[in-house]
Amino acid sequence: MFDYTYLPAPNLIPSIVEMMLKIVFIFSMNMGVFAPLLGWVERKQSALMQDRIGANRAEIFGFTVFGLLHTVTDAIKLLTKEDFIPRGADRPLHYLAPFIAVVPSLVAFAVIPFGGKYMLWGHEVNLVIADLNVGMLYVFAVASLATYGAVIAGWASNNSWSMLGSMRVGAQMLSYEVAMGLTLVGIFMVYGSLQLTTIGMAQENFFHWGIFLQPLGFILFIACALAENKRTPFDMPEAESELIAGYFTEYSGLKFAMFWMAEFLEMVTIAAVLVALFFGGWHIPFITHQGLIAAMGYLFGANFGAIAAMIIHVAVFWLKVVVWIMILMLIRWSLPRFRFDQVMKLGWKIVLPLALANIFITGLVLLAVR
Amino acid sequence: MLNQYIPILVMTLAACGTAAGMIILTSIIGPKREFEEKMEPFECGVSPITDPKSRFGVRFYLVAMLFIVFDIEAVFLFPWAAVFRELGMFGFVEMMVFILVLTVGLAYIWKKGALEWE
């Protein structure tokens, strides 16, 4: 049912402006900052870890800018490559697969709060694109759509290696989706909500951060998230030494880049979910949400103070996300690839029973302290 | 509160537009040079001898079936977890019985070897 009473008629214009600004902000963060830059970060960070120099050749008038120009040259190269489709491939599905892979990774961010609530000139700004009460369920639902992209890519390519890769994607993603859902039940029990803004507000106190209340849930979740992301050590679907490039072997140009982009944007979403659920979201340790707004309000006046607090909170959130992306990259470049039987064993025989045990223990503790 | 979903709709449209734009761009801009050997599926230069759409291991199918059972369990757990504090002891025992039944199922498929990948 459409709840007409909820529509704030006089506030309609500011609400629409607020919505569009938030969508543009998240879109430009994802497409403008993270999608191109993470390729550079990955190359430079791996180079740093392996005592190499890394990308440094692209130059303009003799300036290499730390290899940052490689993001530009890569984009131009991928754009002007031939869009290759092998003989016998299913052409419509071959076009559809990268589309399905990239869209969920762009919209999954919608429910993650990147700041709190602020009063600006009588209009309440809530820094989340869609404040859904089913929050995390939406993230799971959208993230699982990405499985279709990878499976269809392998199926449509008419290549045996792609097909093997897509079979592995299916089995791996389904297995870890079950485990991932169960690992977060503990967090939902502790905070009594699936809504990410509620969970974020509940983490105002540093010692109420999810990492302290659900340490086992955190470890299990990060294992599942890495597996869902399909990066090393869980990159069986695209294992280069076994399957050429797995499900996207037959992709080139921007269609190849879209799978690559989806992977990086999934990583951003995982980092953001980790921050929102386990690391206090936009909160600075030991400084309350209202406390910062009051302090800034004292310095700059009520409205500009709220804007200053907003900027600080958003910056803190993205800083945490960037730190987590770098930790995820550290894991990716440190660990070797698992075997497929080990991955399935980890998912079904270790993470799943531990997640169920975590739910049981969390329930007992919550009833005991009540 | 259905209008909470309007931003998601706008964002989905923007994402679809971006993705479609990228696919259209790359299929227009790139060169097209087709010849017989190049159009073969890539198998390190060797001509493909097997049809990829032949039979595949039944275990992948089995995983998908097990997934349905346990994913529905997870879906039942989400609303329960959100109202866990209000339900109290009764809700806890009730759900633990439900989880126990499914854990017996997990132990059964484990013992039957449905989770082995040799």
Image (tube, rainbow, N blue to C red):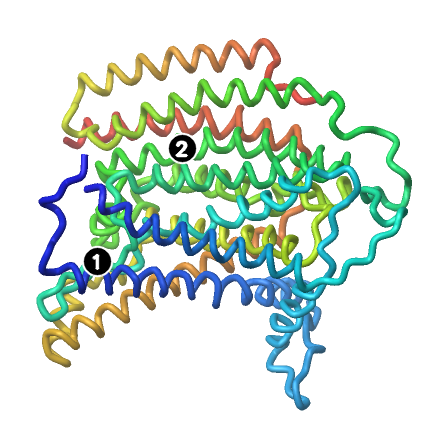
**Mark 1: which secondary structure?**
strand
Say if mark 1 contacts mark 2, CB within 8 Å: no
**Disc number for residue A126:** 1
Q: Residue at x 64, y 87 (%)?
A: A63
Residue A28, x across and y down, in percent: 42, 66
Q: Position of residue A200 (x, y in %)?
A: 25, 51
Q: Quadrant of the C terminus of chain A?
A: top left
Q: Is A231 or A170 nearer to us in this picture?
A: A170
Alpha carbon of mark 1 to alpha carbon of mark 2: how far? 27 Å
> Closer to the camera, B80 or A138?
A138
Q: Answer above or below: position of A186 versus B64.
A: below
Quadrant showing the N terminus of chain A: top left
Front one among B80 and A154: A154
Q: Earlier in the sequence, mark 1 or mark 2?
A: 1
Measured as percent of width and height from the top left, residue A295 is found at 14, 73
Q: Amino acid at mark 2?
A: Gly
Instruction: Tell me the subunit letter for badge 2.
Output: A
Q: Quadrant of residue A333?
A: bottom right
Q: Residue at x 77, y 58 (%)?
A: B32
Residue at 19%, 27% in the rendered image: A367
Residue pointed to by mark 2: A181
Q: Amino acid at mark 1?
A: Asn
Q: Crowding near pointer 2: few (<14 within 10 Å), some, many (20+)?
A: many
